[in-house]
Image (cartoon, rainbow, N blue to C red):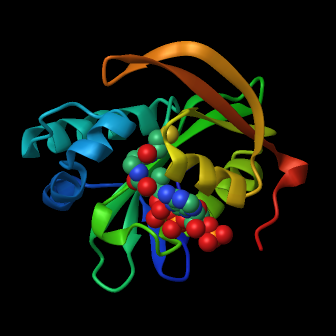
Amino acid sequence: MYKKLTGQRINLRKAALADAKSIYQNAKDKDICMAVPLPMPYTLKTAQEYIKASQKKWETKKEAQFGIEYGKTGEIIGMIGLRSLNFELKKAEVGYWLGKDYWGKGIAKEALGLILKFAFFNLKLNRVYAEVKSKNLSSSKLLERSNFKLEGRLRKDEKFKGKWDDLLIFGMLKHEFSSE
Ligand SMILES: CC(C)(COP(=O)(O)OP(=O)(O)OC[C@H]1O[C@@H](n2cnc3c(N)ncnc32)[C@H](O)[C@@H]1OP(=O)(O)O)[C@@H](O)C(=O)NCCC(=O)NCCS
């Protein structure tokens, strides 16, 4: 089911062990680890183990995790992927993070567009959804600007920084997707 996905400034490709250092350098930030969430402290070994685990999940069709490759350098600057892949019900959850140096440049939006195209046209899914902590404004904005619909709010579903937090569910159906 794998295919390298080519964009304007970035491409999406499978992460290899050689990418562990750049994944570690971009992921180790506390804000990123707390938002996704990723294990803390995030070490080089965490990145290596994550790459191996995600390769296995590709093989067993449980997840499709892509590295976000910065076109200019070939470096992996973040990750975006589909998990809870359900081919019978044609749905999956999308998750992502991007190194802080690359925030606010529309790169996450480009990566999301590429993975949605892959989900709807290569994997032939009907629904892609995302679960976002209500305080994660950047992620909610990214989804809204990418035409996801806010479908629900799970009240006090999670504990974040010691306080209960609501979880927002965003979703997109295939017919709502536009690659523009
Ligand atoms: C979520 C994340 C990937 C967004 O990355 P980003 O670089 O800010 O996203 P983009 O630059 O592509 O922005 C996408 C849109 O959202 C808007 N946006 C992003 N952050 C925003 C913010 N804090 N406030 C208002 N608007 C915001 C942008 O203006 C843009 O809209 P536009 O195209 O209409 O201008 C990044 O903040 C991140 O990695 N966060 C930590 C990990 C995380 O939260 N993962 C998601 C867990 S659910």
| Residue 4 shows up from this direction | no
Q: Where 24 sits versus 49, above or below?
A: below
In percent of width and height, residue 102 lies at 36, 70
Q: In what quadrant of the picture does the C terminus appear?
A: bottom right
Residue 115 location, quadrant? bottom right
In percent of width and height, residue 93 lies at 60, 34
Residue at 9 percent across and 42 percent down: it is 43
Q: Nearer the viewer, residue 35 or 87?
A: 35
Q: Where 149 sits versus 86, above or below?
A: below
> Is 160 left or right of 95, judged from the image as shown?
left
Residue 13 location, quadrant? bottom left
Residue 88 location, quadrant? top right
| Residue 19 shows up from this direction | yes
In percent of width and height, residue 63 lies at 49, 35
Residue at 67 percent across and 30 percent down: it is 169
Q: Residue furthest front?
A: 163
Q: Where 76 sits versus 45, above or below?
A: below
Q: Residue furthest bottom?
A: 72
In percent of width and height, residue 64 lies at 50, 42
> Is 33 left or right of 134, judged from the image as shown?
left
The mark total stands at: 0
Residue at 51 percent across and 29 percent down: it is 62
Q: Where 27 sits versus 75, above or below?
A: above
Residue at 70 percent across and 37 percent down: it is 170
